[in-house]
Image (cartoon, grey):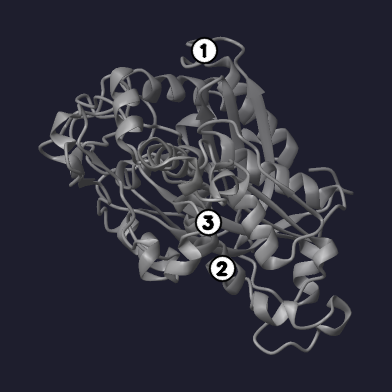
Amino acid sequence: MSQSQTRVVVTGLGATTPLGGDLPSTWSALLAGESGVRKLDWEGVEDLPVRFAGTLKVDPAEVMPKQTLRRLDRNQAIALIAAREAWTDAGFAPPASRKAKKPEEQSGVEGGFTVDGERLGVVFSSGIGGLHTALNSYDVYREKGWSRVSPFTVPMLMPNGASGHVGIEFGAMAGSHALVSACASSGEAVGYAIDMIRAGRADVVICGGTESCIHPLQMASFGAMRAMSTRNEEPERASRPYDKNRDGFVLGEGAAVMILESEEHARARGAQINGIAAGCGYSGDAYDIVLPDPSGSGQAKAMQRALKDAGLEAADIIHINAHATSTPAGDVAELASIKAGLGEEAAAQAAITATKSMTGHLLGGAGALESVFTVLALKEGLIPFVANLEDVDDEVDLDIVRDEPRKVPDGPAAALNNSFGFGGHNVSVAFQRAL
């Protein structure tokens, strides 16, 4: 980061995941090594090759009115749940209070600070969007005819629906964006949010990711690719990054949100600062629509570019939340790219975790959730350990956090969160501890 570049800070965090209905419960379960992966109880599930997933700990129906849910796809509902938590965590006034007054009259609204909607942006991603809506609506069409299809079908299925709903609820008029890059989608959302603030387009940005596509078609299609674990008899132990016996990823669902602000804006209102969103790096493999470039050069470039964008040296990185999905080839390939991106010496000093071992893989929501975990690891001084790591792969030669959370020393600290997606999308986001 150059001397003149605006510094971007994290002032609010929120999530709903397979581990908990909010961020505190999710973080507590993560540090305890709990699993959010469960057997599915669908009719006909026994015919599927994979019969488990990381389903939400708290269903949206438990916290949102039925009439509201009828107009939202599941991925949009959980996006709003996580966004509301992050908004409150950042100390902002409830949306209802914001709508009650004009922006210039809001400085005294009871219940928190306010922000001018013209200076508030949204970047919210989903890798797949409203899959449940699309498939369920087609079933209605076939069985009952076109007149019974909901008029809300299109806004419920479109990938930018979550971004739109979050922008509407909080009155974000600086721009509402939805980046779609498969499993790198919400990592990119964080990077784009940083850029919005640096460019002066917004003072505050709500950024995050959401995904809810645990559906028979999705399970069947990933199963046909032989990409998912088939450990049907012990699903809670199925996601095992870096373990010799890993056999594929575990599908998960959830949403996570970060409130980013310019440091000047945050300090002017006396906001809590959870961490610094220091920079982001991107690259494209240009290799294959599904397979990553085996050389790992694209992933390494993303990490190098994140460091440059953040004004950091490789030696500053003390922790990496790896993409590590628990696939036989992908986990060790990423370790090779970390060594190429940071250099052997710096890579050896970074404590690496893989939190998908407990949450499953949230696809387009993964980058945001793991960014939240990275910020908390620096803030709380504890790095979550990799669950289910019983027999380390012989090719693993870096410092993987095992058995219990790792304490982070006091003082300056920086970390990376990696997200890679089908299509050759590579994103690495750099965070620093706020001192």
Per the rendering, the mark at residue 84 is: 2
Q: Nearer the viewer, mark 3 or mark 1?
A: 3
Image side of residue 315 versus residue 219, left or right: right
Q: Residues within 10 Å of mark 1 (few under 14, many from 20)?
A: some
Q: Is residue 320 visible?
A: no
Per the rendering, the mark at residue 5 is: none
Q: Position of residue 424 (x, y in %)?
A: 56, 20
Image quarter of the N terminus: top right
Q: Position of residue 31 (x, y in %)?
A: 33, 57
Residue at 51% across, 21% down: 337
Q: Secondary structure at mark 3?
A: helix
Earlier-in-chain disc, 2 versus 3: 3
Q: Secondary structure at mark 2?
A: helix
Q: Which residue is mark 1?
A: 293
Image quarter of the C terminus: bottom right
3 and 1 marks in contact (CB < 8 Å)? no
Q: Is residue 411 above or below residue 250?
A: below
Q: Quadrant of residue 243?
A: top left
Furthest residue in direction left, as rendered: 233
Q: Residues within 10 Å of mark 3 (few under 14, many from 20)?
A: many
Image side of residue 122 versus residue 219, left or right: right
Q: Secondary structure at mark 1?
A: loop
Earlier-in-chain disc, 2 versus 1: 2
2 and 1 marks in contact (CB < 8 Å)? no
Quote the CA–CA distance across marks 3 and 1. 32 Å
Q: Residues within 10 Å of mark 2 (few under 14, many from 20)?
A: many
Q: Nearer the viewer, mark 2 or mark 1?
A: 2
Amino acid tagged 2? Arg
Image side of residue 400 versus residue 174, left or right: left
Q: Which residue is mark 3?
A: 79
Q: Identify which residue, 170 or 334, lies in the foreground.
A: 170
Q: Position of residue 193 (x, y in %)?
A: 71, 48
